[in-house]
Structures are given as C-alpha cells and as structure tokens.
Amino acid sequence: MTNKGMQHLANALKSNTTLTTLHLTSMPIDEAGAQYLADALQKNTTLTTLELGWNKIGPKEAYHFAPGLANNTTLTTLILQCSSLKDGGMEYLADALEKNETLITLDLQWNHFEAVSAQHLAKGVRNHKKLTTLELKGNSIYEQGAEYIADILQHNTALMTLGLDNNWMKDDGIKHIASALQHNTTLTTLCLENNGIEGEGAQHLASALRNNSVSSILDSSFVLNGPSSLYTDTEKTVSLSK
C-alpha cells in the first residue's frame, strides 16, 4: 500500500463506527504510513484487533506509531510479529504501553530484540492491568534479558500466557524466570521451547511450580536421561523431552 493509500485508509478509520478487525500484513509501512495510522488510532473508537506483522516496522516507524497506541481506547489485540523493532523501536513501544489501558494480547514474535529491549518491555508492561497474553517467541533475550522478563512475571498481575520459545535463556536465565514464578499468582501457561534448558534449569522450574498457578509449561527441547516428567500432580505437569 502506498502512503497515499494509507492516508485514505486512515481518514476512513477516523470516522468508521463498525470495523473491529484490520489486517495490514506484508505491506511495508514507512514513517509517513505509521504517522497516518497513529492519527487514526487516536480517533477511532471501534477497532479492537490490529495486525501489522511482516511490515518491517523499525525504530523510526515505531516512534510515529507509538502515540496512537498510547491514546487508543479500544484496541485489545496488537500483532507486530516479524517486524524490525529492535532496541530503539521497543523503547518507543514500551512508553506507549505504559499509557495504554486496553491491550489484552501483544504479539512481538521474531523482532530481533535483545536484553535492552526486554528491559524496555518490562518497564512498559510490568504494571499493565489488562494484558493477559504476551508472545515473545524468537527474539534474542538470552540469559541477560531473562532477568527483565522475570520482572514482568513478578509484578504484573494480569498476565496469563507468556511465550518465550526460541530465546536461548539457558539455565542461568531460567533461574530468574523460576524465581519470579514463585511470586506470580496469575500465569497459567508458559512456553519455553528451544531455550537450552538442562537439568539445573528444569529443577528450578519444577520447584517453582509446586506453589504456583501455572498449569502448563511447554518445552519439548529438553532431555535428562531420556524423556522425563520432573514434577507431576493432579493439576500440573512439566513434561520435558527432546
């Protein structure tokens, strides 16, 4: 879509009173397009789902888009998977998330951000009252960023599902996650596929589960003397196998 097309779409959104879902995937949005979209979000009162995946939204585009997210009053689902937010873009997005009061689902899969971005994100959502699903699969959080994700788990009281697949936090990072789980009372599903978890990390997770609300930890990338279920009772199972 050209900038002219985005401008026309944004103008229509400002006064539309029926549209609830908008998919704008794989149509690269530049700075001007992001600004048009942000302007529309600040005036639209019906849109609840916005999908912007595969649009190469980087720091410059995020800067222009952020005010729309901060001031929108209806959006509940935002999908930004496979963009290029990186550390700079995440900082702008996090500032908007601090002000946003409606978002329930945020999808940030495969955005190539690292520990600094995780720190920005934690600042943005640690006190968010509505966010229940946060998808962070395929970033580069690693051990250094795990501490900031743990901060989200320790302080956010709404989050129920957290996707951390393919982030290679390894045992040292998982220790932070497990420690935070002991203070979290709302999370029910935690996805940890392909994080390089070995025996020590799995034991920390199993211990954390005993006094936690999590009912499902999903990870098929781990092996300890063959497939094993490290902790099982009538409600909870950690089943880790390769």
Image (cartoon, rainbow, N blue to C red):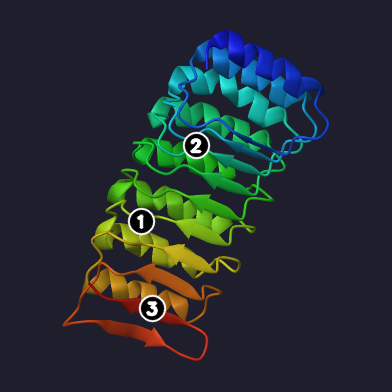
Please identify the quadrant where the C terminus is shown.
bottom left
In the picture, the disc for residue 123 is: none
Residue 134 lies, with reference to residue 22, above or below; the image says: below
Q: Amino acid at mark 1?
A: Asp
* Left or right, 23 with reference to 74: left
Q: Residue at x 64, y 47 (%)?
A: 128
* Left or right, 35 with reference to 114: right
Tell me the CA gap for discs 1 and 2. 16 Å
Mark 2 residue element? loop
Tell me the CA gap for discs 1 and 3. 15 Å
Residue 2 lies, with reference to residue 191, above or below; the image says: above
Disc 1 marks which residue? 165
User: Residue 81 occupies which quadrant of the picture?
Assistant: top left
The outermost residue toward the top is 4
Q: Residue at x 51, y 76 (%)?
A: 215
Residue 90 lies, with reference to residue 63, above or below; the image says: below
Q: Are marks 3 and 2 in contact (CB under 8 Å)?
A: no
In the picture, the disc for residue 238 is: 3
Image position, residue 236 (x, y; %) = 48, 82
Is 104 or 25 nearer to us in this picture? 25
Image position, residue 114 (x, y; %) = 34, 39
Q: Residue at x 53, y 67 (%)?
A: 183
| Numbered circles on residues, count | 3
- Please name which of the two marks, 3 or 2, marks the residue nearer to the observer: 2
Q: Residue at x 49, y 40 (%)?
A: 121
| Marks 3 and 2, the one that precedes in the sequence | 2
Disc 2 marks which residue? 80
Tell me the CA gap for discs 3 and 2. 30 Å
User: Residue 38 occupies which quadrant of the picture?
Assistant: top right
Image position, residue 115 (x, y; %) = 35, 41
User: Residue 155 occupies which quadrant of the picture?
Assistant: bottom right
